[in-house]
């Protein structure tokens, strides 16, 4: 039995701020259970809801040195959906209403977490062959592993993988403070190791010291070797090109299934969508106070409202797009200027725009089920999960050709009758507008073609089946 430990800062259903949590919460159960024992370790944040805290039980605790500090490390466990979870408890580090967000606190928090993950293993008696680390919060694990832990027999053959979900977030802070927190000697803070542009960089440490590096789509794996997408680490990505692969994300096909989804008013599948999907549109128009019209072209936007997702293009074009025969349903929170932008347009175009500036999982399913199209014009997108959810619900994605969007949405070709969505190449607001208009034209004037697009979208398979196999191959290659 090969043993794998996922180390991450978030995972559904326990705690989520973004797509990372969906991946960490849905991938582990998709491995072949006869060959792989995959477990997950997360921080036990105080802000985890009681519903999930009640499922955890105390295992043990110990004290750990973090440079000159000695810190309490509690370990809890839980089982969910056939997967074993461990939680690191420390009420000083994992306090607050949100799991993270202030970099000056997060830097020490995740140095603590990373070292605690390794220190806990001999105590709980789990000796993984591979520690699979996700994003900068766990970047110090490969570093600590090679720095001291490898000297201990228990850790000698342990390998590590660093998966980049978003290169923009790197966990960078001044070297003096990071040395004081981690106790790592000066040796580690040179430009071939943790140092980048004068700071200590956790993600860089993970990328340098991990035995393999992955990211969440093939296109993004290529893009991050270039200055535009490389977030100033393109040189490092080029240097590690031999160790770097792209493995596209999947989604949980049990949770996202229009045929069984308890959150949506009318269930449907690839056979029944022509009659049934429309009922979800009706229900949502009613619920949100939009004009009730089966035939209206309804576009969904579910997202963190940040620049990454292309909201400056939308802000620029929103007035113009609202002149078209469309409805927009927006769901999500984020930067205040975008929240206010959507509130403004919802006020200006009352029966065309519905701005839902909050997040709710059930509501997101209702929007995927109700809309005809889904707009996602990202500036960059390591993988993107919403377009996969849209495809699953027969909601046609309109995307920019970048990262995972390029790899998962096949552009409509009206001459060959192929494709699952609409896409445009350049980060340009008029290109986006023209693509929306093109989609609208097919929807209103070539309904049979549109329905065939939906057929192909719903037939696409972005469950974890294929990608879990790719990770298995990667693990096999590392385990001697
Ligand atoms: C991050 C990326 C997103 C990706 C997700 C899961 O949120 O921005 O593109 O799908 O991680 O890997």
Image: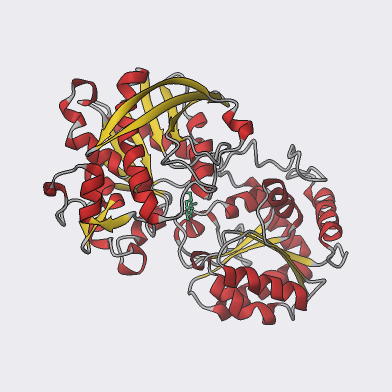
Quadrant of residue 175 in the image? bottom left
Is there any visible trace of residue 242 in the rendered image?
Answer: no
Q: Is residue 378 above or below residue 4?
A: below
Q: Position of residue 208 (x, y in %)?
A: 22, 48
Q: Where is residue 143 in the image (x, y as percent from the top left)?
A: 23, 41
Q: Where is residue 166 in the image (x, y as percent from the top left)?
A: 41, 55
Residue furthest left as drawn: 187
Q: In this view, does 116 lie above or below 291?
A: above
Q: Position of residue 74 (x, y in %)?
A: 41, 27
Is there any visible trace of residue 454 in the rendered image?
Answer: yes
> On the picture, is 318 further left or further right than 194?
right
Q: Residue at x 68, y 50 (%)?
A: 360
Q: Which residue is drawn at 54% across and 43% down?
A: 22
Taking depth in this image into account, of 246 and 78 the one nearest to the observer is 78
Q: Specify the quadrant that holds the N terminus.
A: top left
Q: Is residue 300 above or below residue 218?
A: below
Count of number-bearing discs: 0
Q: Residue at x 34, y 50 (%)?
A: 107
State the colouring used for the structure image.
Answer: secondary structure
Taking depth in this image into account, of 13 and 468 the one nearest to the observer is 13
> On the picture, is 333 further left or further right than 211?
right
Q: Specify the quadrant that holds the C terminus.
A: top left
């Amino acid at each position: 039995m090969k043993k794998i430990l996922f180390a991450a800062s978030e995972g559904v259903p326990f705690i989520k701020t973004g797509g990372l949590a969906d991946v960490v919460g849905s991938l582990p159960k998709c491995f072949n259970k006869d060959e792989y024992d995959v477990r997950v370790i997360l921080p036990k944040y105080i802000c985890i809801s009681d519903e999930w805290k009640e499922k955890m039980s105390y295992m043990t605790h110990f004290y750990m040195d973090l440079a000159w500090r000695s810190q309490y490390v509690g370990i809890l466990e839980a089982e969910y959906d056939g997967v074993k979870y461990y939680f690191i408890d420390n009420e000083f580090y994992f306090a607050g209403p949100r799991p993270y967000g202030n970099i000056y606190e997060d830097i020490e928090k995740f140095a603590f977490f990373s070292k605690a993950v390794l220190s806990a293993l001999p105590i709980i008696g789990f000796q993984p062959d591979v520690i699979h680390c996700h994003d900068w919060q766990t970047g110090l694990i490969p570093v600590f592993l090679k720095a001291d832990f490898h000297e201990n027999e228990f850790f000698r053959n342990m390998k590590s993988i660093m998966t980049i979900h978003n290169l923009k977030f790197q966990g960078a802070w001044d070297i003096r403070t990071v040395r004081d927190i981690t106790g790592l000697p000066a040796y580690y803070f040179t430009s071939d190791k943790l140092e980048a542009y004068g700071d200590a960089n956790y993600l860089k440490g993970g990328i340098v010291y991990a035995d393999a590096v992955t990211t969440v789509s093939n296109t993004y794996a290529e893009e991050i070797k270039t200055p535009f997408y490389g977030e100033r680490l393109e040189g490092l990505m080029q240097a590690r090109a031999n160790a770097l692969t792209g493995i596209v994300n999947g989604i949980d096909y049990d949770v996202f299934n229009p045929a069984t989804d308890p959150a949506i008013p009318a269930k449907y599948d690839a056979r029944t969508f022509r009659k049934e999907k429309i009922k979800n549109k009706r229900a949502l128009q009613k619920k949100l106070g939009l004009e009730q019209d089966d035939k209206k072209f309804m576009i969904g936007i579910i997202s963190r409202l940040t620049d990454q997702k292309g909201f400056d293009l939308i802000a620029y074009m929103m007035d113009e797009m609202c002149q078209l025969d469309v409805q927009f349903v927006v769901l999500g929170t984020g930067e205040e200027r975008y929240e206010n932008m959507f509130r403004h347009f919802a006020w200006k175009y009352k029966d065309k725009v519905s701005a839902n500036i909050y997040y709710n999982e059930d509501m997101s399913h209702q929007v995927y089920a109700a809309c005809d199209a889904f707009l996602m014009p990202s500036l960059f997108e390591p993988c993107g999960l919403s377009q996969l959810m849209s495809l699953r619900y027969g909601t046609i994605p309109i995307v920019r050709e970048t990262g995972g969007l390029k790899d998962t949405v096949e552009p409509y070709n009206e001459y060959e009758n192929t494709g699952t969505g609409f896409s445009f190449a350049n980060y340009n607001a008029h290109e986006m507008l023209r693509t929306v208009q093109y989609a609208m034209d097919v929807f209103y004037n070539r309904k049979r073609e549109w329905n065939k697009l939906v057929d192909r979208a719903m037939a696409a398979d972005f469950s974890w089946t294929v990608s879990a196999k790719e990770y298995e191959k990667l693990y096999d290659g590392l385990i001697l």
